[in-house]
Image (spheres, rainbow, N blue to C red):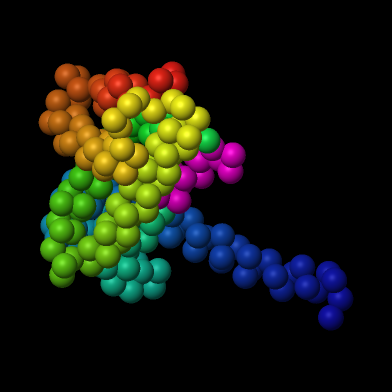
Amino acid sequence: MTSEQTRVDDGPATSATRKGDQTRTLILRTALTQFGEQGYRGASLRDIASRCGISHPGLLYHFPTKEALLLAVLDHRDQVDRAEHATANDSGIDVLRRLVRSAQVNQSRPGIVELFVVVSAESTSVEHPAHQFFQDRYARLVDEVARAYAEVEEQGGLVAGVQPRRAAQQVIALMDGLQVQWLLDNDGVDMSEALRTHIQRDVSFTV
């Protein structure tokens, strides 16, 4: 087979793959909105497919179950957030500052905030398909933020009496609570500033 034949043969496959990726991304974005607005139980796969302009079987080709779609949406958003905000050389104080930046960014995307608020609350039931996802997610977040506080402590930047792991749990709880308040009162709640003020009380470095 010649190189020219290879290019010709690969063309349709590459085009189909690209189209499939685009459809998958469209489904994820649409599902994110629907899950955020209606919760996991209220959202319908048929409605999501209709909003994407594809058939129900077409959606099931990419995501065979509603559970698979929900987990893909949650994982996709976490991956995007990590790619946008994290760097390989983040120091402890950088991690804490990143939390504040993330809260600021979230104020421009209510659909994502609503998705995590609604589905994380629903997922407290062990029968919910995202139960394990959120259990693992919170454990990972607490560990990450606790390590950040511990590093700040090693550098002499932690206020006396602040315990890294307890501080991490408090920060994450504050973030969750602020998201609920912000969804109910967008104009009256500044998530990033409230979070910055709280963290600044724990550390001597500028957040």
Tell me, yes or no, if residue 206 can be seen here. Answer: yes
Q: Which residues are magenta?
A: 78-90
Q: Residue furthest front?
A: 160
Placement of 119 over or under 174, stated as above or below: below
Q: Residue furthest bottom?
A: 1
Q: How many marks?
A: 0
Tell me, yes or no, if residue 104 can be seen here. Answer: no
Near-viewer residue (4 or 188)? 188
Near-viewer residue (114 or 49)? 114
Q: Residue furthest right?
A: 2
Q: Position of residue 4 (x, y in %)?
A: 83, 69
Placement of 138 over or under 10, stated as above or below: above
Tell me the quarter of the image containing the C terminus.
Answer: top left
Tell me the quarter of the image containing the N terminus.
Answer: bottom right
Q: Position of residue 171 (x, y in %)?
A: 28, 36
Near-viewer residue (111 or 9)? 111
Placement of 65 over or under 159, stated as above or below: below
Placement of 22 over or under 86, stated as above or below: below
Q: Position of residue 118 (x, y in %)?
A: 17, 48
In the image, residue 89 lies in the stretch drawn in magenta: yes
Residue at 70 percent of width and 70 percent of height:
10
In the image, residue 107 lies in the stretch drawn in magenta: no
Instruction: Name the dominant secondary structure of the magenta segment.
Output: helix
Residue at 74 percent of width and 69 percent of height:
8
Residue at 59 percent of width and 39 percent of height:
89
Q: Position of residue 95 (x, y in %)?
A: 45, 36
Q: Relative to 195, is 44 on the left or the right?
A: left
Quarter location, residue 59: bottom left
Residue at 68 percent of width and 66 percent of height:
11
